[in-house]
Image (cartoon, rainbow, N blue to C red):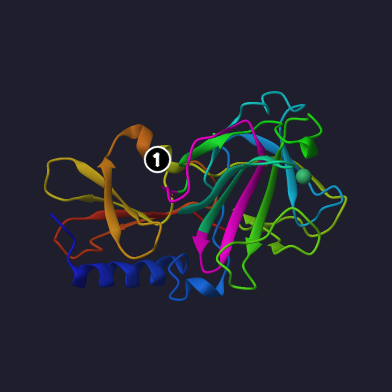
Amino acid sequence: MVVSAVLRVGISAALVATFGVFVTASPAMAAPALQLPFPCGQKWQLDTWQHAPALDMVKEPDQHGTDGATLIAPAAGTVNQSFYHSNAGNVIQIDHGGGYYTTYLHLGYRAVSVGARVQMGTTIGKVGATGPTSNGHPHLHFELGYDRDGNGSASWGYAGSERVRPTFNGVTYGTANGQTWNNVTSRNCGATGFQAPAMMRDDGDGTMTIYRWSSTGSSFARASDYTSGGWTMANTGDLVASGDVDADGRDDIVAAYQNG
Ligand SMILES: [Zn+2]
C-alpha cells in the first residue's frame, strides 16, 4: 500500500503537532541537522586547535582505530568534490542543500565520486593521514561550509574560507580555538536504529513495516519490515507514540529521535 498524498499531509501535520521537530519548509534557512560522520555509538575526540570552526577528530580512547576508521555521511546530500589535493590529501565535499557543504580532509580512502547521492550513514571513505598537512598523523579534518558567494561549493582549509560552526546532534562545536570535546558519541544510527521521524505501521503485508521520513523531508518511504534489531529506543529523550496516524483503521507507532 502506498501512502496517499492526502495521508502524507495528515501524517506530517500529526508529527509536527506531536513532536514539533524536523519538518521545515525552508531548507535554506538553517544548516543541515548533522550527526557525527562515524558509525552509531563510536566515541570521538573533537579539537579546534588553532583552526576553529574546523574540527580535527580522533577516535576514543587514545586515538586507537583512527587510521582506517569508516567515515559515513553526517546527513543526506550529493558529493560535489572527491579528489586528491596536494596539501590536504584525499578530499571529499558533500552538498547538503541550502548552501551548506561538509568537507573531509586527509582521507585514507575515498569511496564516493562526484555526483554520488548519499544518505545519512552512507559510507563515503576511510580516515587516514594523506597529504602533507596531516603531518602523518591519522585524523579527520572536518569542516561545515556555507557557500556565501554562491559559486556552487564552499571554500575550505584556511582562515577566512566559507567554513562555519557545525552542529552535531543538536550541539554546536568549533566555537573557539583551543577547544577539546572528549567522548562525543555518534548518534549517526542509520538503518540499525531509526532516524526521526519514523513510523511503524501495518500496511497490510502481514508484518509491521518501518517507514522513515525521507532525508529530503517530503514523505514517508517504506524502509524495511520490522525486526527487533531495526527498531530500538536506545536513548533518553527518544519519543514514541501510538495511534492511527494515517487513518487507515490500524494503529501505528510513531517515533522521533530528539535532536537537540
Ligand atoms: Zn585540522
Look at 35% across and 57% down and name the residue there: 213
Report crowding for label 1: few under 14, some 14 to 19, many 20 or more residues within 10 A (C-alpha).
some
Q: Position of residue 226 (x, y in %)?
A: 27, 39
Q: Quadrant of the N terminus?
A: bottom left
User: Horizontal placement of 163 versus 169: left or right?
Assistant: right
In the foreground, 110 or 206: 110
How many marks on residues?
1
Q: Quadrant of residue 224?
A: top left
Asked if the stretch drawn in magenta spans residue 103, the answer is yes
- In the picture as drawn, the residue positioned furthest to the top comes out as 64
- Whether the residue carrying mark 1 lies under 8 Å from ligand 1 is answered with no
At label 1, the amino acid type is Ala
Look at 79% across and 39% down and name the residue there: 133
Asked if the stretch drawn in magenta spans residue 82, the answer is no
Look at 64% across and 73% down and name the residue there: 149
Ligand 1 image position (quadrant) = top right
User: Horizontal placement of 243 versus 186: left or right?
Assistant: left
Q: Quadrant of residue 187?
A: top right
Q: Position of residue 20 (x, y in %)?
A: 46, 69
Residue 76 visible in the current orientation:
no
Residue 161 visible in the current orientation:
yes
User: Horizontal placement of 80 versus 251: left or right?
Assistant: right
Q: Which residue is mark 1?
A: 191
In the foreground, 79 or 216: 79
Vertical arrangement, residue 163 with respect to residue 26, above or below: above
Q: Position of residue 195 (x, y in %)?
A: 43, 50
Q: Position of residue 126 (x, y in %)?
A: 58, 32
Quick one: SS at disc 1? Answer: helix
Q: Which residues are magenta?
A: 96-119
Q: Quadrant of the C terminus?
A: bottom right
